[in-house]
Amino acid sequence: METTLPTAELPERHYLNQGQGIASWLLTKDHKRIAIMYLLGVTFFFLLGGIMAMLIRLELLTPQGDLLEPDTYNRVFTMHGVFMVFFVLLPVVPAILGNFLIPIMIGAKDLAFPKINLLSWYLYMIGGGLTMYAMVRGGVDTGWTFYTPFSSTYSNTHVMATAIGVFINGFSGILTGVNFIVTIHRMRAPGLTWFRLPLFVWGHYATSLIQVLGTPVVAIAIALVGLERLFHLGIFDASRGGDPVLFQHLFWFYSHPAVYIMVLPPMGVISELVAAFSRKPVFGYRIVAYSSIGIAVLGFLVWGHHMFVSGQSVYASVVFSVLTMLVAIPSAIKVFNWSSTLYRGSVSYETPMLYALAFLGLFLIGGLTGVMLATLGFDVYVHDTYFVVAHFHYVMVGGAIVSFLGGLHYWWPKMFGRMYPVFWSKLSALLVFVGFNLTFFPQFIVGYLGMPRRYWQYPAEFQVWNVLSTAGASVLAIGFLLPGCYLLWSLKYGKVAGPNPWGALGLEWTIPSPPPTENFDGVPVVKGEPYDYQTGEEIFGILGKEAHVV
C-alpha cells in the first residue's frame, strides 16, 4: 500500500496544545479532548477488571478453592463483570472513537451539544467512582446482573453503592446517544447524504437509538431494586408479594440490546478497516447500513432467550428462540459482505487489518455459538455453564475489545500525529488472537462437559481445561499490555504520521494530524460515494479552497 510520507514535524496548532494545564482539560468542550479523557478512564477501569479476571483464573488453576474464600470469589467475579460490562465494553468504542471521529467524519466542528458531552464524561467518572467505593469497602456479590431477590433483599454487601454507580453511568450513555443522534441528523456536511455516510457513523447511529430507548428501562429496574432494599417493598421479593422474574424481564429487555451497543460500533470500525486495507468499496454498502438498523430493532425482541429456565411459558420460549435466530441474519450479512469486500482486494496486512481479521474469526465463533444457545433444548442443557461464559467473551471481548484495538491502531496517527512500532504492534495482535482462543475455547469444552460458572471449586477432571484457560489468559494479558507500552512510547519517539499515513478515504484523512481544535478551516463538501477507492476520484473538497485527497 502506498502511504503518505511523514512530514518533518507536527502541525503548529492542534487540539492537544490549545490550552495547557489540567483545568483546560477538565473544562474542555472539545469532543476530541473529551474522547482522550474517556480513553484514560476506560483504560483505568479495564485494568481494574483485568486484575479481577487474573484473580479468577488463578483461583481456577486448581480444583480446590485454595486462593480466595468463597465469599471473596463471589465478589471478585461480580466486580469483574460490573467494571468490564458497564465501564469498559459499553463505552469503549462509542465514547472514545465515536466521540473523536463522528464530528470529523460528517464535516462538523464538534458535537451538537458540547457541554452535554462533557457532562456525560463526568457522569461516567462519578458512576465509576461510586462503584470503586463499593469495591474498596468490600465489594458486591450479586453477579453483574443484580438478580433479585438476592440483590434487593438478602445480600449484605454494598449493592446500593454499586447500583447507584451503574444508574448514574446509564445517564452518561443516554446523553451520548442523544448527542450522536442530533449531530448526525443536523450537522452533516453539504453533499453528505445518508447513503454517503461512513458505515462507522451508521453503526453509532443505530447504537444511539438503543441507548436512548433501552437504557431508561434498566435504570428503572435498578431504581426499583434500591427502593425494595431501602423500604422493604414487595416488588421483586416473592415473600412480600413481589415477582423476581419481573426483574429479569426488565433487566434483559435492556441488557440484550446492550450487547449490540457493545457490538454495532465495533462493526462500524471493521467496515472502515476492511475497506481501507483491501482498497475496495464495502460490498453491498446499503445492505450493511440497513443491517445495523435491523440489528437494533430485532435486538429489542429477543430478551426472553435469557429466561428459558426461569419458568416462562414454553410457547414464549419457542417464539424467543426463533426471534433470536432471526437477529443473527443481519449480523451474518455483515460478515458475508466483509468477506466479499476482501475477495480479490489488494489486501495489506497492516496492524489494524490484523485486528480486523481476528475480529472476523472470533465474532464468527461467538455468533455461531449464539445460534446454538438460541436453540431451546441446547440452551437448557448448557445454561449457567462455562459454555455461556465462552460465548459471551467471544462476542464481547473478541468483538468489542479486538475491534477497538484495531480502530485505535488505525486512528492513532490521526489522534496524536505519530506512528507506532510495526513489529511490536503486529506481535501484540498475534498474542491477543492466540491468547484469547487459548483462554476461552477450552471453556466451551468444559462447559459442555458440565462445569457450572460462578463456582470457586470444581471436579478434578476439569482441571486440564482450566490450566489451558489460565495459561491463555497470561498470553492475552501480555497482548493487552504491550499496546499500552509502545503507544505511550510513540507519543514522544514515534515517527510523524502526516495527515494520511494509510492512504485512506474519509473526511478525517483530509485534515492535519493531530486535528486542529475546530477540525476544518472551511466547510467541507462531499462530492462522491463512500469508499470509492477504485476510481481514484477526488470526492472531498473545502468550500473556497482546493482539497487534496490521497
Image: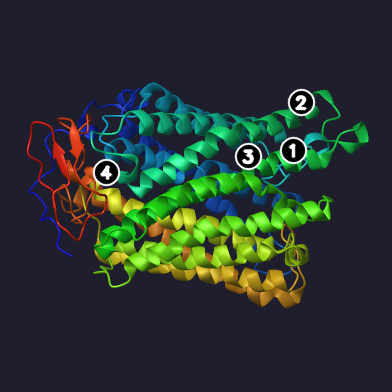
Residue 150, percent from left and from top: 80, 41
Residue 393, percent from left and from top: 57, 59
Q: Is residue 115 visible?
A: yes
Query: Contact, CB < 8 Å: mark 1 with mark 2?
Result: no
Closer to the N terminus: mark 1 or mark 2? Answer: 1
Q: Amino acid at mark 3?
A: Met
Residue 131, percent from left and from top: 60, 36
Q: Which residue is mark 3?
A: 135
Q: Which residue is mark 2?
A: 227
Helix, strand or loop for disc 4 = helix
Q: Amino acid at mark 4?
A: Met
The residue carrying pointer 2 sits among few (fewer than 14), some (14 to 19) or many (20 or more) residues within 10 Å by Cα, namely some
Helix, strand or loop for disc 2 = helix
Is residue 8 or residue 109 the one in the foreground? Answer: 109
Is residue 87 or residue 489 the one in the foreground? Answer: 87
Relative to 482, say whether 215 is above or below.
above
Q: Which residue is mark 4?
A: 415
Relative to 72, say whether 378 is above or below.
below
Helix, strand or loop for disc 3 = helix
Query: Contact, CB < 8 Å: mark 2 with mark 3?
Result: no
Relative to 287, say whether 367 is above or below.
below
